[in-house]
Image (tube, grey):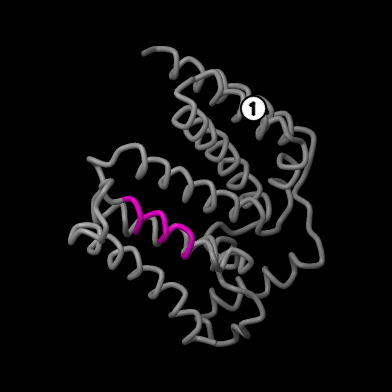
């Protein structure tokens, strides 16, 4: 019973030390896309009046909420640590072995490409958080059928749609997650039970609100 906590703690220590070193030696990096995100973040702070819709609002909202570049970098390193722990959870749950979860988590946090992206003022790190958080919630849904609820179904819909609204290439993620929610009823039942049907409807609501709201804005 102590083993998962020991592995999770070890991974957390490695992830934090690594990022403290990066904070000491590095700096936030801007690319050409960064300026468009920042411009749209300023438009959001100005009341959306001049938001031209050239990018989905996921990352501009994040920038508007956090503020200066240094704070965004610090926040993205925090997201990187959260992603590391989520990957530990996914690996642990799927394999039943804490050490395997630790290996999966370390594979992410020691990946220099991922680490340096956290210092880059682009949407990759935030998108990765939403995507991995969606998958972690899906793993929880599948492994704990007795704890499936309308709140978890709504959370899955919200997380998958936040992934898409941050990076549009994930526009089909809500559909794939919905398929898992729909087919995760009891075995040998040929049709959706009323409870599963309710979960499907509740899942769809935040997807319609987030993605439908963006389409209406456009």
Q: Residue at x 45, y 23 (%)?
A: 96
* Left or right position of 189 against 114: left
Give the residue number, with chain letter if any, for mark 1.
106
Q: Quadrant of the N terminus?
A: top left
Coordinates of residue 7 in the picture (x, y in percent): 51, 18
Q: Residue at x 41, y 46 (%)?
A: 137
Coordinates of residue 164 in the picture (x, y in percent): 55, 65
Coordinates of residue 128 in the picture (x, y in percent): 60, 50
Q: Nearer the viewer, residue 189 or 6?
A: 189
Q: Which residues fall within the magenta stretch?
A: 175-184
**Quick check: is 208 in the magenta stretch?**
no
In this rendering, the answer to whether 10 lies above or below 117 is above
Q: Main secondary structure of the magenta part?
A: helix
Q: Residue at x 54, y 87 (%)?
A: 218
* Left or right position of 73 against 213: right
* Left or right position of 145 against 59: left
**Quick check: is 177 in the magenta stretch?**
yes
Give the quadrant of residue 203: bottom left
Coordinates of residue 181 in the picture (x, y in percent): 36, 55
In this rendering, the answer to whether 114 lies above or below 181 is above
Q: Residue at x 54, y 79 (%)?
A: 46
């Amino acid at each position: 019973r102590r083993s998962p906590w020991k592995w999770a703690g070890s991974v957390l220590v490695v992830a934090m030390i690594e990022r403290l070193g990066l904070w000491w030696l590095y700096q936030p990096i801007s690319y050409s896309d960064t300026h468009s995100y920042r411009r749209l973040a300023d438009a959001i702070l100005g009341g959306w009046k001049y938001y031209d819709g050239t990018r989905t609002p996921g990352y501009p909202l994040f920038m508007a909420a956090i503020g200066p570049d240094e704070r965004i970098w610090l926040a993205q390193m925090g997201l990187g640590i959260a992603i590391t722990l989520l990957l530990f959870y996914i690996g642990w749950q799927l394999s039943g072995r804490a050490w395997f979860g630790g290996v999966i988590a370390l594979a992410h946090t020691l990946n220099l490409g991922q680490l340096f992206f956290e210092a880059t003022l682009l949407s990759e790190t935030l998108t990765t958080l939403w995507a991995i958080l969606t998958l972690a919630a899906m793993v929880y849904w599948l492994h704990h059928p007795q704890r499936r609820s309308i709140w978890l179904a709504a959370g899955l819909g919200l997380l998958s749609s936040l992934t898409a609204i941050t990076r549009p290439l994930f526009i089909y993620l809500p559909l794939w997650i919905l398929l898992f929610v729909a087919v995760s009823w009891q075995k040998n039942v040929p049709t959706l039970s009323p409870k599963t049907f309710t979960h499907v409807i509740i899942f769809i609501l935040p997807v319609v609100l987030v993605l439908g709201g963006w389409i209406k804005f456009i």
